[in-house]
């Protein structure tokens, strides 16, 4: 207290004391009482080719539309600010498009240098205009996605928070289901064994691939798995867009007695009307959206009433910035959500979604990251590590096929 009982204002001295721990431009800004301003100093892009242990086949392979998948190509973006803050993000491509994503990212990345990494929305728009002639969906925004995710990772790391906490988490864990053990190239006995291993590892539900040329084989596989597992274990199926409208309706009705959690992608991803017809006619919920590559495409799907459960993929629709826009609209329409693939990103986004979601567990990406996500009691847990909580392994670095750097390391 000052003489006369007047209280002393310690706020200025507290701000100065805190600022003394801040580096570079942040120190000057804090001492001046201004907003903290930082700048992107360096960006590194990497194309990393992840080989898969076994060639992967779903219905698209068995119906002759695609070849078995033997690798996944990732675009990683790593950035450093002038004050030494770092962020990492990624997008990916299956079968084709990986080199294209990398090429587009290298063309637009130079506009990042000197930008304040806090201004993520503005940067997203700037990157979009830098490549405006190739549009605002597909490969163009998938290239932006890796950069956008890295910006959000940097922001959360700088705050010392897991990304879910920075966004405002509704929960610290999310219901999780396994996909990677139920592909069509896997014999049903092995599918059952994989399912039991997943459940023992704390994963809560099992997804099975369907859509074979002979529908009887689909019924036999689902029946065998359903009978082998505890009746309380939730099961869902995924047809990977392989049915026409009549077949999807017939199969949907045949599957009704199984009490499936959902039927995923029964029709072409862009057939909003067909999916809406199924959603109205069947008791089993319809899930779709993973193949769409923009928020606008998802909005059309939602407005058509084509999905009970939406399945956006942040790397496919342009990153976290776009995902949050879509999530707000999906919540407004009171839809459930089950983001596709990339659990290292989607766990955080699902934890921040108000309506209880699901997150997809894939073990394919394990060789890329030093860290592991915890699963127990049917749920996947957000770690206490700041940002996404991931760092690249030396093996991932060894799988690097191309790199590009912009700016100067501070």
Image (cartoon, grey):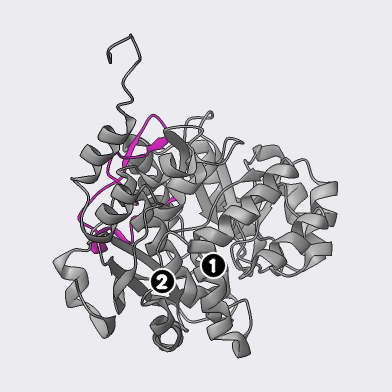
Of 13 and 365, the residue lying toward us: 13
Q: Position of residue 317 (x, y in %)?
A: 57, 67
Query: For the point 73% across and 52% down, which residue is it?
Result: 307
Asked whether the viewer can see residue 178, the reply is no
Q: Mark 1: give few (<14), some (14-19) or many (20+) Cα within 10 Å.
A: few
Query: For the point 26% across and 59% down, which residue is it?
Result: 85
Of 134 and 235, the residue lying toward us: 134
Residue pointed to by mark 1:
122
Of 390 and 252, the residue lying toward us: 390
Horizontal arrangement in the rendering, residue 137 relative to residue 281 (left or right): left
Mark 2 or mark 1, earlier in chain: 2
Q: Which residues are magenta?
A: 360-387
Residue pointed to by mark 2:
115
Per the image, label 2 sits on a secondary structure element best described as loop
Horizontal arrangement in the rendering, residue 241 relative to residue 34 (left or right): right
Per the image, label 1 sits on a secondary structure element best described as helix
Q: Mark 2: give few (<14), some (14-19) or many (20+) Cα within 10 Å.
A: some
Query: For the point 39% across and 29% down, which residue is it?
Result: 377
Q: Position of residue 198 (x, y in %)?
A: 36, 42
The quarter holding residue 44 reads bottom left
Q: Position of residue 380 (x, y in %)?
A: 39, 39
Which is the main secondary structure of the residues drawn in magenta?
loop
Horizontal arrangement in the rendering, residue 373 relative to residue 101 (left or right): left
């Amino acid at each position: 207290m000052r003489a006369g009982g007047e209280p002393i204002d310690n706020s200025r001295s507290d701000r100065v004391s805190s600022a003394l721990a801040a580096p570079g431009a942040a120190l000057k800004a804090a001492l001046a009482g201004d907003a903290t301003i930082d700048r992107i100093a360096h960006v590194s892009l990497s194309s990393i080719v992840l080989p898969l242990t076994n060639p992967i086949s779903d219905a698209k392979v068995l119906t002759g539309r695609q070849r078995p998948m033997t690798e996944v190509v990732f675009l990683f973006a790593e950035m450093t600010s002038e004050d030494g803050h770092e962020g990492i993000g990624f997008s990916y491509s299956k079968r084709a498009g990986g080199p294209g994503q990398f090429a587009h990212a290298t063309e637009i990345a130079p506009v990042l240098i000197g930008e304040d990494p806090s201004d993520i929305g503005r940067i997203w728009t700037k990157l979009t205009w830098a490549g405006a002639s190739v549009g605002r969906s597909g490969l163009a925004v998938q290239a932006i996605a890796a950069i956008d995710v890295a910006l959000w990772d940097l922001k959360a790391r700088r705050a010392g928070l897991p990304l879910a906490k920075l966004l405002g988490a509704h929960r610290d864990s999310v219901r999780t289901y396994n996909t990677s053990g139920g592909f069509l190239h896997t014999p049903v006995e092995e599918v059952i064994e994989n399912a039991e291993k997943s459940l023992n590892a704390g994963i809560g539900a099992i997804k099975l691939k369907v859509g074979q040329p002979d529908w009887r084989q689909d019924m036999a596989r689902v029946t065998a798995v359903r009978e082998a597992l505890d009746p309380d274990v939730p099961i869902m199926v995924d047809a990977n867009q392989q049915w026409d409208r009549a077949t999807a309706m017939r199969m949907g009705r045949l599957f009704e007695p199984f009490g499936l959690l959902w039927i995923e992608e029964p029709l072409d991803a862009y057939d909003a009307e067909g999916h809406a017809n199924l959603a109205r006619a069947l008791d089993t919920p319809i899930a779709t959206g993973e193949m769409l590559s923009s928020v606008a495409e998802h909005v059309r799907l939602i407005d058509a009433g084509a999905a009970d459960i939406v399945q956006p993929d942040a790397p496919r629709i342009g990153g976290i910035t776009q995902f949050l826009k879509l999530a707000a609209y999906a919540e407004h329409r009171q839809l459930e959500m089950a983001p596709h693939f990339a659990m290292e990103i989607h766990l955080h986004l699902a934890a921040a979604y108000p309506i209880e979601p699901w997150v997809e567990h894939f073990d394919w990406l394990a060789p890329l990251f030093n860290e592991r996500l915890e699963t127990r009691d049917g749920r996947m847990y957000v770690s206490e590590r700041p940002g996404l909580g991931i760092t690249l392994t030396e093996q991932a670095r060894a799988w690097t096929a191309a790199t590009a750097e912009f700016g100067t390391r501070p």
